[in-house]
Amino acid sequence: MSKFTNEKKSVKKQISRGGEIGKHDGFKIHCQQWLEGSSPSSGTKILNIKLTEKILRLIITIMYIDTHAHLNFNAFKEDSSEIIEKCLTDNIWMINVGTQYITSKRAVEMARKHEQGVYAAIGLHPMSLETGLVKIKADPNETEERIGEKQFDYEKYKELAVKNVNNGGKVVAIGEIGLDYYWRPKTQIRKKLFKQKQKELLLEQLKLAKELNLPVIFHCRMAHQDLVDILKENKELIPEKAVAHGFVGTTEELEQYLEFGFSVGLNGIIFKNIEGINFKENIKKIPLEKILLETDCPYLTPSPFEGERNTPLNLKYIAQRVAETKNIRPEILVEAATNNAKNLFGI
Ligand SMILES: [Zn+2]
């Protein structure tokens, strides 16, 4: 008997027990709503759904990959295991992304606990670099107190990666790395030094990605032109496979990343109104084979749940919005994004 027939039986059995179909419930509701062309809303309970063969097949086969999650952060200290289990049951896989050594290590530990479905990226985020040039506020959602690394310990990160690339393939990328100009040092000299230090950090980590033949997850805030220029100046370090995660920029900036062959990660920020940014236009411009879906949880909770802590379980709302904007069926978008993620990260 095929896996599908088996699962179909189990779904039907659960429904006959009284409406709740447990692990497939969320998918049932969303598939049904997608097929009817309406938007999913919170707390919806659809009872007595007529389960056609088509819906059942969708319920069972739709699979998501959250390519940028932070269940390795302090915000999930109490319940990360619970959330991961829920995601895996709902067919949502994830990559937990490191931002410094401690969160990278934690991402690896989480990945190692699961045979499949949970992966790690490791790296030193530009904001986690302690430059002494600007005071950066601690983010208790990330770590209890600000740690900050004075320099990039190449060998230490390499060891963390190597141990877990060769042994089970749990580290699937170097990231998140890049440039972040949100915090500004006060003087011109300091500003220049600050940018220089971020650039050096980025180049070191691009070297590591090359050495280990791993894709790169780029974080870039208010610094797209510098990132593009740095890559063009250091052509030998341009990663073959990379994603511009949580892209917020102009259409021209987007095009530059696409020219490098990079993928683009879309998350809940697309629900926001940001001056000078046309998310709709950007989404239309990204070819389907370059789209990745991500939550960046615990941040950037998509509408209609703003204000709540984000989790990978919300990925479907981002998928829904992207599909609407691209005017394609959500299941087509999700299937493409999942395949893109598998190809990019080798999972
Ligand atoms: Zn992130």
Image (cartoon, helix red, strand yellow):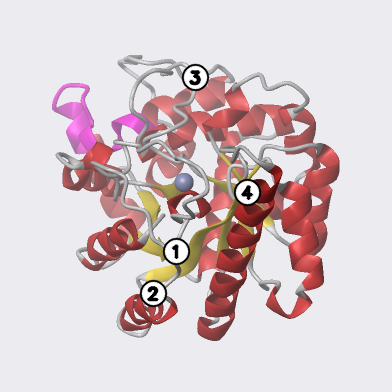
Q: How far apart are marks 4 and 3 (CA)?
A: 39 Å
Q: What element carries label 2?
A: helix
Q: Mark 3 points at which residue?
A: 303
Earlier-in-chain disc, 1 versus 4: 1
What crowding class fits label 4: few (fewer than 14 Cα within 10 Å), some (14-19), or many (20 or more)? some
Identify the image quadrant of the C terminus.
bottom left
Q: Do the residues labelled 1 and 4 touch (CB within 8 Å)?
A: no
Q: Can residue 26 be seen in this view?
A: yes
Q: Distance between the residues labelled 2 and 3?
A: 36 Å
Specify the quadrant of the image occupied by residue 161.
Answer: bottom left
Nearest-to-viewer mark from 4 and 3: 4
**Near-viewer residue (340 or 192):** 192
Horizontal side of 63 relative to 167 (left or right) equals right
Earlier-in-chain disc, 4 versus 3: 4
Identified at 78% across, 25% down, the residue is 276
The answer to whether the residue bearing label 1 lies less than 8 angstroms from the nearest atom of ligand 1 is no
Q: What stretch is highlighted in magenta?
A: 13-27
Dot 4 amino acid type: Arg
**Near-viewer residue (126 or 271):** 126
Q: Mark 2 points at which residue?
A: 157
Q: Are marks 1 and 2 in contact (CB under 8 Å)?
A: yes
Earlier-in-chain disc, 2 versus 4: 2
Q: Is mark 1 on a helix, strand or loop?
A: loop
* x, y percent for residue 279: 72, 30
* x, y percent for residue 2: 33, 61
* x, y percent for residue 250: 79, 37
Q: Distance between the residues labelled 1 and 4?
A: 24 Å
Q: Name the residue under label 1.
A: 123
Q: Distance between the residues labelled 1 and 2?
A: 7 Å
Horizontal side of 145 relative to 191 (left or right) equals left
Nearest-to-viewer mark from 2 and 3: 2
Earlier-in-chain disc, 3 versus 1: 1
